[in-house]
Image (spheres, grey):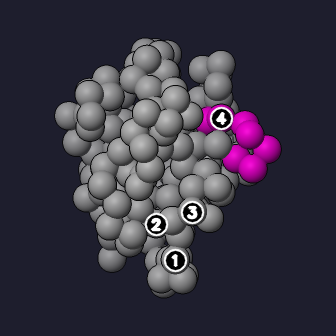
């Protein structure tokens, strides 16, 4: 079973903030780096979100996600291992406390990280999105639902704020 790891070092210079899922660092896509960085927002975007999230504790990871609606969110990790907590910020760096949105973002991030790992893609900036899953997802992802469910359950159980 895959696990979630939080390195303190960033990937590709992304603000020293990265989150890894099963050893695959945030940021994998088999596309031209320049076009993907333009889509992703780059290190400044992640630095701004990490700075805003720091009001809630020591940030150890930031992952960008975009729903079908185009609504951008950031899954932020605080701490590591058994003490790790989670928070989602919206595009304006506001805290999200809607349970449905939190579960959607956590699931989307987990599926995209697994898709990248299964596809064996190099580490590159990416936004977890349905379009990304369409581009790199395979039938093998169906076997990983337990990993995704466990990750989503962790995010919900260790969310820094009460969910409504």
Label 1: which secondary element: loop
Q: Whole-Å distance between the Cαs marked 2 and 3? A: 9 Å
Badge 1 density bin: few <14, some 14–19, many ≥20, Cα 10 Å: some
Q: Residue at x 43, y 33 (%)?
A: 34
In terms of sequence position, does the residue under pointer 2 or pointer 4 come before the other?
4
Would you say residue 72 sits in the magenta stretch? yes
- Image disc number at residue 91: none
In the displayed structure, 151 sits above or below 155; it is below
In the displayed structure, 119 sits above or below 28; it is below
Task: Name the residue that disc number 3 marks.
Answer: 135
In the displayed structure, 67 sits above or below 39; it is below
The picture places residue 55, in percent across and down from the top left corner, at 46, 15
Quarter of the image containing the N terminus? bottom left
Badge 3 density bin: few <14, some 14–19, many ≥20, Cα 10 Å: few
Task: Name the residue that disc number 2 marks.
Answer: 115
Quarter of the image containing the C terminus? top right
Q: In the displayed image of the protein, which residue is found farthest to the right?
A: 69
Q: Residue at x 47, y 44 (%)?
A: 126
Q: Whole-Å distance between the Cαs marked 3 and 1? A: 9 Å
For the magenta stretch, what is the residue range? 67-73
Q: Whole-Å distance between the Cαs marked 1 and 4? A: 24 Å
The picture places residue 122, in percent across and down from the top left corner, at 30, 55
Task: Name the residue that disc number 4 marks.
Answer: 72
In terms of sequence position, does the residue under pointer 2 or pointer 3 come before the other?
2
The picture places residue 134, in percent across and down from the top left corner, at 62, 64
Q: Whole-Å distance between the Cαs marked 4 and 3? A: 19 Å
């Amino acid at each position: 079973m895959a696990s979630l790891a939080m390195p303190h070092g960033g990937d590709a210079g992304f603000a020293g903030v990265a989150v890894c899922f099963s050893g695959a660092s945030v940021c994998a896509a088999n596309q031209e780096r320049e076009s993907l960085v333009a889509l992703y927002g780059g290190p400044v975007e992640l630095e701004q979100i990490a700075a805003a999230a720091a009001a809630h504790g020591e940030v150890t990871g930031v992952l960008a996600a975009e729903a079908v609606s185009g609504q951008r969110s950031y899954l932020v990790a605080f701490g590591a291992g058994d003490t790790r907590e989670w928070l989602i910020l919206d595009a304006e760096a506001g805290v999200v406390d809607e349970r449905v949105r939190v579960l959607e973002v956590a699931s989307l991030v987990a599926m995209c990280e697994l898709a990248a790992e299964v596809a064996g893609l190099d580490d590159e900036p990416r936004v977890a999105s349905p379009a990304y899953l369409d581009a790199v997802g395979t039938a093998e992802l169906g076997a990983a639902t337990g990993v995704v469910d466990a990750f989503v359950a962790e995010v919900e159980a260790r969310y820094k704020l009460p969910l409504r």
